[in-house]
Image (cartoon, rainbow, N blue to C red):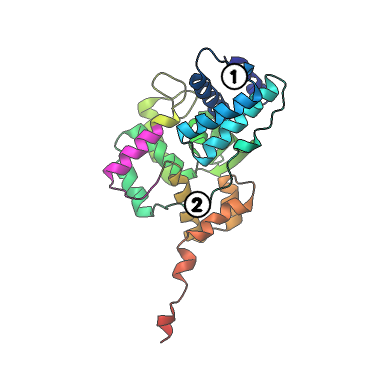
Amino acid sequence: MFQNFNTILKAKRYSDSTINTYVGLLASYQQYLGDTLAINRLDISYLITTLRDFILQKHYAFNTQKQLISAVSLYYKEELRQDIDLSSLRPRSPQRVLPDILSAYEVKNILHHTTNLKHKAALTTIYALGLRVGELIDLRLSSIDKKRNTITIKAAKGKKDRQLPFPESLKPLLRRYYVMYQPTEYLFNGQSKPQYTAGSLRSVFRASCNKAHIKKKVTLHSLRHAYATHLMDTGTDLRMIQELLGHSDIKTTMIYTHVTTRSMQQVKSPLDFL
């Protein structure tokens, strides 16, 4: 049903990750409506009512709810040539909660308990380069420049390419992985698909965290948080971290100033002056 919408988004150069997310959310909402109701034939007031009930039933998180509203609005605009107002369903910004940060020891422990070579290589690459899961999945072999010692992340979030240094410590693991698995186009391919899936990788991460007895509330994205925080802990300039992460706004990067231990360890307690 959403094949034409998928084509439109590709023509407009939306990232594969965004297209998959939008089409997946639309398909899930259509499934909720059932076979007798088509999303493209709903009265707007009924659309808003069913969307609201669907969101409440699914218990969607803040970002997922935003993505669903954006997907429906874009579908109506591009596919049906209608501008609709779904502002009443947009969630208000949540209170900022600082993420739980994995220590260097905890990251090492998680990777140690990831025994499958392919899984270990994937998780290590995310941490070593500070990647989003979609960026890892979309990483092609052609993006690795051995001569210049760089890795190019193509059309990342915000439609921007960025170049990252290729860590020497990552190379031996990727060589072993390449020899064993012989990937062709993408660095990490799936069993029956050209690319590995985000869901599979998240399952791998959860299993490794359980084996490593990690009690913190962390997700696969926590490896990216850890990358940024550990760079800041070692004194890397904030602007450089912004470039490495691909943040368009320095304010996004500044969240790591609240979780780094570097500045906190330099603060003296009043007890020290007694």
In the image, residue 217 lies in the stretch drawn in magenta: yes
What's the residue type where badge 1 is placed?
Answer: Ile
Whether residue 16 is visible here, answered yes or no, is: no
User: x, y percentage for residue 124?
Assistant: 40, 41
User: x, y percentage for residue 118?
Assistant: 36, 32
Quadrant holding the C terminus: bottom left
Q: Residue furthest bottom?
A: 274
Q: Nearer the viewer, residue 45 or 224?
A: 45
Q: Residues within 10 Å of mark 2 (few under 14, many from 20)?
A: many
What's the residue type where badge 2 is placed?
Answer: Ala
User: x, y percentage for residue 236?
Assistant: 53, 58
User: x, y percentage for residue 111?
Assistant: 34, 43
Position of 105 compared to 61: left or right? left
Residue drawn 72% across the image and 23% down it: 82
Q: Nearer the viewer, residue 28 or 224?
A: 28
Q: Residues within 10 Å of mark 1 (few under 14, many from 20)?
A: some
Residue drawn 38% across the image and 53% down it: 104
In the displayed structure, would residue 128 be above or below residue 153?
below
| Residue at numbered disc 1 | 39
Disc with the residue nearer the chain's start (1 vs 2):
1
In the displayed structure, would residue 205 be above or below residue 34?
below
Helix, strand or loop at disc 2? helix
| Residue at numbered disc 2 | 228
Residue drawn 39% across the image and 37% down it: 121
Q: Quadrant of residue 19?
A: top right
Measure how far apart labels 1 and 2 are at the Cα level. Answer: 41 Å
Q: Quadrant of residue 67?
A: top right
Residue drawn 51% across the image and 60% down it: 258
Q: Which residues are magenta?
A: 201-218
Whether residue 39 is visible here, answered yes or no, is: yes
